[in-house]
Image (cartoon, rainbow, N blue to C red):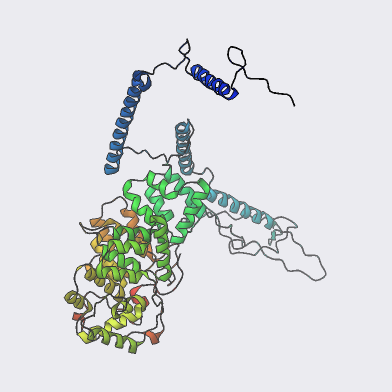
């Protein structure tokens, strides 16, 4: 192992104490390090001092504030415009619901109109041209020719006359007897005179008689007459029969303005058709032209026709849902309208109305009834919407008498609308036949009319609804006759008039017409002519006049679209007549003899629903 070199002092001399020398050397090294660390450089390489105006960038901040102020100003203006539009519905139609069209659409449309006009002119000229051939003259010449041939055959040799039948006009023609074993001589010979000279026969003169048709011809028994020529107008179209293709094309021409009278086309192709046929035409129109028929008709006709077009073409359940929604929002005679819809539809139709209401308004009908109504009216409407009604036509007289007795004796809760009350159980679950029998028995106990009972004991909206309900139950046609009468008066509602005539046209319009004339002393058509001046009046008149049956056929007595049409009931189910005198049954139409409840009220009990 090598020995450590001896420590030396700074001067280079050996030291006397190694420990002290080592300590001194370490301290000197530390001082050296401290001096090196504290040494300052000759060059200043520190970062320059930052200035405040460079860090803040005031000009950029000012530009951003100005831009933000401009954006806020524009947003305020846009918000003010949107608020104004929402309050006033705006003055411009900014809906982009147009269909793309070519640049020369109007040119092609005018060209199509010009061609259609020219075709109409050509058609009118062709129809107005008189024929240059006379059929009577042809028949006259043919008969003359046949007459000449027959006369020539009488004097011509070997001409077979056996097929000809002698007539009084041809005295010279005689059938010659056939001799046995000899050949029959078929030639016509001259008659021999006494002096042996042969006298030739002369043809008879042709005597032409003027016929009723204007031609001249000799009547001949053996001649087969020519068949009569039936002139058929190929341009005349029979619109009494439903043809979905023809109706769709006629409506398309009407929507394009190519027809002279669009209202007449609507009457012939829609009003005089049944509900199902109108829906078929609507679907066919979409299939052929890829357009909505109702929208095209509204664009061609005036705005006054919009409710009529909706009533004609909108599906029945959607139309009822729209009516109920408008009634809940405060339309005129809302209570009677709600009773009209809910009490003249069967359970299945009510389910379809609730589904259509939910699809159209994105809310349940029951929830809207709870939010828009209150009290007893709300309970009544919710009970009718439940759809738990018995739809049979059977009537238990004993049970009806018992229900009437319980309702009459319960003076405190007689008109209570609680879910467990007798009234609600009767109105919402029992059949209309049972309700009518119960009310009839109640009238016997109270010795007064049911309407007078309601007037004395009820008030407000619930009173109006109950009056409408009683009128519908006792005699539905009279209820609708009254609705039509009030709707046509100066303060009436056009929507109610259109709806009643449209929905009852295929149901019980003949009865409504009869009751209307008996009650008010005038026909519905006369009052339409006197009180209605809207451009759609011909459509309403045709609905009333043509309700007995379209296509020349009488309508069968069955329910259409959830409404019962009068059916002949069994004789054993007839209800008992009222016990009070006629003076106590005002407001009610007497039933025809031999009819039961469904025939008398026209309400729903069973059947198909579209």
The relative height of residue 440 versus residue 163 in the rendered view (above or below) is below
Q: Nearer the viewer, residue 122 or 105?
A: 105
Looking at this view, name the residue that lies furthest to the left.
456
Q: Nearer the viewer, residue 501 or 230?
A: 501
**Residue 213 in sight in this render:** no
**Residue 10 in sight in this render:** yes
How many numbered badges does the structure rendering display? 0
Looking at this view, name the residue that lies furthest to the top.
42
The relative height of residue 507 versus residue 596 in the rendered view (above or below) is above
Kindly indicate the quadrant of the structure image that contains residue 435: bottom left
Kindly indicate the quadrant of the structure image that contains residue 532: bottom left
Q: Residue 542, how many percent across, how many down?
A: 35, 58
| Residue at point 23%, 78% (across, down) | 450
Q: Residue 174, how many percent across, how many down?
A: 67, 64
Q: Nearer the viewer, residue 332 or 597?
A: 332
Q: Residue 44, how many percent across, how many down?
A: 45, 12
Q: Quadrant of the N terminus?
A: top right
Q: Residue 359, how many percent across, how many down?
A: 42, 57
The relative height of residue 73 versus residue 199 in the rendered view (above or below) is above
């Amino acid at each position: 192992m090598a020995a450590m070199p001896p420590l030396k002092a700074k001067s280079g001399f050996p030291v006397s104490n190694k420990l002290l020398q080592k300590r001194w050397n370490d301290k000197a090294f530390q001082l050296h390090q401290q001096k090196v660390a504290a040494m300052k450089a000759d060059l200043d390489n520190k970062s320059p001092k930052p200035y405040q105006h460079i860090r803040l960038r005031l000009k950029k901040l000012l530009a951003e504030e100005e831009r933000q102020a401009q954006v806020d100003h524009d947003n305020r203006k846009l918000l003010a415009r949107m608020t104004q539009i929402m309050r006033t519905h705006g003055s411009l139609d900014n809906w982009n619901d147009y269909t793309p069209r070519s640049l020369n659409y109007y040119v092609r449309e005018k060209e199509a109109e010009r061609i259609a006009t020219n075709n109409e002119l050509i058609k009118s000229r062709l129809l107005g041209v008189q024929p240059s051939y006379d059929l009577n003259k042809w028949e006259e010449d043919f008969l003359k020719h046949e007459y000449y041939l027959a006369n020539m055959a009488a004097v011509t040799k070997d001409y077979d006359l056996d097929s000809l039948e002698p007539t009084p006009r041809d005295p010279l023609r005689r059938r010659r007897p056939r001799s046995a074993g000899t050949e029959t001589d078929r030639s016509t010979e001259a008659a021999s005179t006494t002096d042996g000279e042969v006298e030739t026969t002369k043809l008879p003169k042709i005597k032409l008689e003027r016929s009723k048709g204007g031609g001249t011809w000799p009547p001949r028994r053996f001649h087969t007459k020519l068949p009569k020529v039936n002139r058929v107008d190929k341009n005349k179209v029979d619109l009494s029969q439903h043809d979905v293709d023809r109706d769709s094309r006629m409506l398309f021409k009407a929507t394009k303005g190519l027809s002279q009278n669009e209202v007449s086309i609507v009457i012939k192709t829609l009003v005089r058709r049944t509900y199902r046929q109108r829906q078929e035409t609507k679907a066919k129109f979409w299939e052929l032209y890829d357009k909505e028929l109702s929208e095209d008709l509204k664009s061609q006709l005036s705005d006054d026709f919009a409710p009529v077009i909706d009533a004609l073409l909108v599906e029945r359940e959607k139309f009822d849902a729209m009516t109920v929604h408008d009634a809940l929002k405060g339309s005129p005679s809302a209570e009677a309208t709600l009773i009209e819809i809910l009490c003249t539809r069967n359970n299945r139709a009510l389910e379809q109305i609730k589904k259509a209401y939910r699809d159209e308004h994105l809310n349940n009908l029951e929830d809207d009834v709870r939010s828009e109504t209150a009290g007893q009216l709300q309970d009544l409407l919710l009970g009718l919407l439940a759809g738990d009604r018995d739809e049979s036509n059977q009537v238990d007289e004993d049970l009806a008498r018992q229900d009437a007795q319980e309702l009459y004796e319960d003076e405190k809760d007689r008109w209570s609308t609680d879910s467990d009350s007798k009234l609600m159980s009767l109105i919402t679950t029992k059949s209309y036949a049972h309700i009518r029998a119960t009310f009839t028995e109640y009238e016997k106990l109270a010795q007064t009319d049911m309407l007078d009972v309601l007037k004395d004991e009820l008030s407000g909206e619930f009173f109006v609804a109950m009056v409408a309900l009683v009128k519908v139950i006792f005699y539905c046609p009279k209820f609708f006759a009254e609705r039509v009468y009030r709707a046509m008066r100066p303060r009436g509602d056009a929507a109610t008039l259109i709806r009643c005539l449209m929905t009852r046209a295929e149901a019980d319009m003949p009865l409504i017409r009869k009751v209307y004339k008996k009650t008010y002393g005038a026909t519905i058509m006369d009052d339409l002519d006197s009180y209605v001046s809207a451009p759609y009046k011909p459509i309403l008149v045709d609905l009333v006049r043509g309700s007995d049956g379209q296509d020349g056929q009488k309508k069968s007595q069955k329910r259409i679209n959830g409404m019962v049409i009068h059916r002949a009931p069994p004789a054993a189910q007839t209800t008992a007549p009222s016990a009070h005198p006629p003076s106590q049954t005002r407001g009610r139409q007497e039933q025809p003899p031999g009819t039961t409840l469904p025939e008398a009220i026209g309400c729903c009990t069973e059947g198909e629903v579209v």
